[in-house]
Amino acid sequence: MGTRLRILVADDHATVRQGLKLLIDSQSDMTVVGEVADGKGVLEQADALTPDIVVMDISMPGMNGLIATRMLKRVQPDVAIVALTRHEDGAYLEELLRAGASGYVLKQSAPAEFLRAIRAVAAGGVYLDPAMTSGVADGLLDRDRAASRRPPAPISERESDVLRLIAIGHSNKEVAAQLGISVKTVEVHKSNAMRKLGMTGRVDVIRYAVLQGWLYDT
């Protein structure tokens, strides 16, 4: 693959950081360029090292992983963030996605899941631990039931194509190039699809992608 993915690891447990470093450095396409124990360290080291990916624990002393994610994406919007946590609560997942994380993996999952997430976000995609996806889908269904309104209008095949590409991490410009349409047309299709499906933001799009099985098509 040429150059390796440069990864910054953030976790307040030294043994976890060491284990992640051994796992990451054993891969031919990635390497750990730094380790930190809290959110403040993430911001400082990300500024100094400009990593491609930050592996972010949520529960860290001082500045936690959620706040660090939000602040880091503000100053380095291109860095990809994979949240690595024990929290199976969907509320954490939603907040991390809103903050700008592209991956969410449980520490309880197999190492292969973690590596898959890193490669997916490095390629510009979104990756949610499969153990979390049923809860994400349930959340969308519960919200729709609670809304007690008419079923959403069906979206067109082209609107579906646009929404799928956006959900897995492509920019409007990349979607336009792939589908052979203008960026303006992409924006119109995206807006129409979200309106028909009652979506208000990124979390809704990702939830819908989970329901459709789009995140794991690779």
Image (cartoon, rainbow, N blue to C red):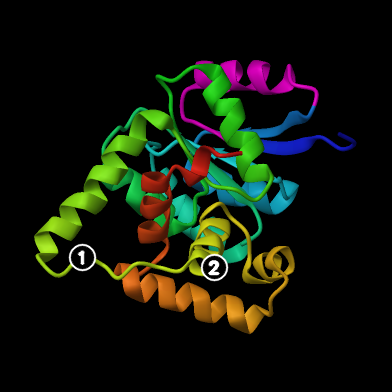
Residue 175 picture location, percent across and down: 65, 65
Residue, x 58% and y 55% (percent of image)? 169
Is 24 in the magenta? yes
Q: Secondary structure at mark 1?
A: loop
Disc 1/disc 2 C-alpha distance (Å): 20 Å
Nearer to the camera, 121 or 170: 170
| On-image quarter of the N terminus | top right
Q: Earlier in the sequence, mark 1 or mark 2?
A: 1
Residue name at image x 20 percent, y 65 percent? 151
| x and y, in percent, of residue 38 in the image | 48, 39
Q: Secondary structure at mark 2?
A: helix
- Tell me which amino acid carries mark 1: Pro
Q: Is residue 15 visible?
A: yes
Horizontal side of 74 relative to 31 (left or right) equals left
Nearer to us in this view, 134 or 39: 134
Question: Is 94 situated left or right of 1 in this image?
Answer: left
Front in this rendered view, residue 136 or 176: 176
Q: Which residues are magenta?
A: 9-28
Relative side of 74 to 144, left or right = right
Residue drawn at x 80%, y 23% is: 28
At a point 51% along the width and 76% down the height, the residue shown is 189
Disc 2 marks a residue whose amino acid type is Arg
Q: How many marks?
A: 2
Which disc is residue 158 wearing?
A: 2
Is residue 67 in the magenta section? no
Q: Which residue is mark 1?
A: 151
Q: Count neighbours of disc 2 (C-alpha within 10 A) and say few if under 14, some if 14 to 19, many if 20 or more.
A: some
Q: Is residue 6 above or below residue 181?
A: above
Q: In terms of secondary structure, what is the magenta stretch mainly?
A: helix
User: In which quadrant of the rendered view does residue 181 lie?
Assistant: bottom right
Whether 54 is drawn above or below 142: the answer is above
